[in-house]
Amino acid sequence: MKLNNRNSKFSSLVLGALALIGLFHVNTMPGQEAAGERSSYIVQGASLPAVKALVQARGGEITHELGVIEAVAAELTPSQLAALRDNDAIRKVYGNGTVETAGKPSDKGKGDSGGSDSGSEGTGNEVLETNFPTLTNADDVHALGITGEGIGIAVLDTGLWKHEGITLDPYGSVRLKAAYNAINDTVIRKPLNGGDLGGHGTHVASIAVSTLVTDAGKYNGIAPGAHLVSVQAFGPNGQGTYADVIRAIDWVVANKSKHQIRILNLSFSAEPRSHYWDDPINQAVMVAWQKEIFVVAAAGNRGPGSMTIGVPGNVPYVMTVGAMTDSFTPADGADDKLATFSSAGPTYEGFVKPEVVAPGGHMLGLMDKYDSQLALDYPEFHYGGKYFEMSGTSQATAVVSGIAALALQAEAWRSVDELKCKILSAAKPAVNQDGSLAYSIFQQGAGLVDAYEAVMNQTVDCANRGLHIDNDIDGYQHFGGRANQNPDGSYYLMGMDGYIWTDGGVGTEGYIWTDGYVWTDGYVWTDSYLWTDGSVNANGYIWTDGYVWTDGYIWTDSNVSIGGYIWTDALTEMATMSSWVDPE
């Protein structure tokens, strides 16, 4: 079934919900609007050259070329905006909103996990045990000589601190292949000269690839042999724009072969404001997946309630990651549990998300003590001169990016869909003593990732079946998953008995994560359905007109255009990305 031709007119779809970039002062001719009325928008059409020509013909000032989604970002006056929206050659116009990466720590709980002032003492030469490589059995993969060598991970974030644990591979060679700043559209000629004034990007990257080795011979990172590409789209305070993020993804796609980029780490999560296919960041992410770049996205930190999965984790194709915690007892698996902040599914379109969970509580990673904003503002979370403690699905995402690199070194020929299946089918769900699931699959997905099993297992056909990414990107078809909602508010999976979940919190008790659970009727990630825009479609979805989301936003028919959902002025700024959560 076809939906919405690619060349259809979507002039009513405007991202008014986003906080606009601001007012831009330019010279105007007599009779034109005042310069202060200019705002930034993303204008999308059939091709990048065509969109550029139309915007320039109307007098708009182009600031970003976003070829990955056939769009530009431009500063426009109201009359220029209206003229472009009325042009049949323009596909969509979005407000270019501000987004944020890691938020600020709250005062609540500081020091409870050892993150006290005393933790920052030390010479700076100590190598601490990070535990998560052991918790995910990545250390067993390292023992086989598999470290991610030859696999490139692009980290799209705030930049990168040039600590040797990040810049050097296990043999002492530089493994930072490139650094690109999407904010000013600059490739850093000497990558080792760049930095990270925010700190978030460094923390994430070190979890994925740190080569520091403890006295016990354990690596600090999951894939210490992988090489890195640093892509900056957020500033020192975690501020960025949609245009900068999309331009960063565009650059990664264009430079995939040059830098051997196989994995794209997206440790941010914005609240959805539309169907997955109508969000411009999601559109760019789908193109990256189409080009065989394995995208790993954070589920978000708005859990544990249902339908809190963020952008771009709500893209059905990509690997979306939630978080668990070892409860500060890494040697005792009996109290391991789902993190309370970890966002849960299903997505609006009925997909089970996250697919997996990974360690994301009180994670130790590298961060510059003197020049990173997070470390400067909150030194009580800094340890031993170079480590910083953070919790979040951002950190869990980095763990899975590292595992993907290990699996690709072992079997470099695997497609992105096959790799996704290998990782999720190797995961271990948390179960009760009777073998039933301790958490809903909408909270834990397939369970806790296992690096060793992901590398070794040969199950490769369980992910993204029934989806057609080419048609999805072109706008001919869009898809829904098995998830649905009963009239009493509980969630279930169509065609599969025993998967009913009433939305609720996460308990304090721990559970064993085991591979003893048998999934029936195949994996829930196998088959998908064509999506229709009605509130009740042929497959029985009952996302009704007045459905109230957990964050208080209501989806109504007044928000629906022929292209999907309108981003209305009634909403606030786009999102807080990878917001700070207290250690747990």
Image (cartoon, helix red, strand yellow):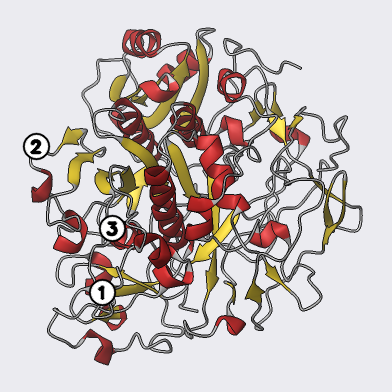
Image side of residue 196 versus residue 413, left or right? left
Q: CA distance from mark 1 to mark 3?
A: 17 Å
What is the crowding at mark 3: few (fewer than 14 residues within 10 Å), some, or many (at least 20)? many
Residue 562 vs residue 464, the one in the foreground: 464
- Which secondary structure, mark 3? loop
Image side of residue 13 versus residue 51, left or right? right
Labelled pair 2, 3 in contact (Cβ < 8 Å): no
Q: Which mark is residue 434?
A: none
Q: Position of residue 492 (x, y in %)?
A: 83, 53
Q: CA distance from mark 2 to mark 1?
A: 28 Å
Camera-nearest label, 1 or 3: 3
Q: Position of residue 351 (x, y in %)?
A: 70, 44
Q: Which residue is mark 1?
A: 387
Q: Position of residue 427 (x, y in %)?
A: 60, 58
Q: What amino acid type is highlighted by mark number 1?
A: Tyr
User: Which one is earlier in the sequence, the residue at label 2 or at label 3?
Assistant: 2
Q: Which residue is mark 3?
A: 224
- Name the quadrant containing residue 259: top left
Q: What amino acid type is highlighted by mark number 2?
A: Arg
The residue drawn where x is 15% and y is 57% is 162
Residue 90 vs residue 571, the one in the foreground: 90
Residue 70 vs residue 499, the one in the foreground: 499
Image position of 400 with respect to 392: above or below: above
Q: What amino acid type is highlighted by mark number 3?
A: Pro
Image side of residue 325 versus residue 31, left or right? right
Q: Which residue is mark 2?
A: 189
- Name the quadrant containing residue 465: top right
Camera-nearest label, 2 or 3: 3
User: Which one is earlier in the sequence, the residue at label 1 or at label 3?
Assistant: 3
Image position of 502 with respect to 380: above or below: above
What is the crowding at mark 2: few (fewer than 14 residues within 10 Å), some, or many (at least 20)? few
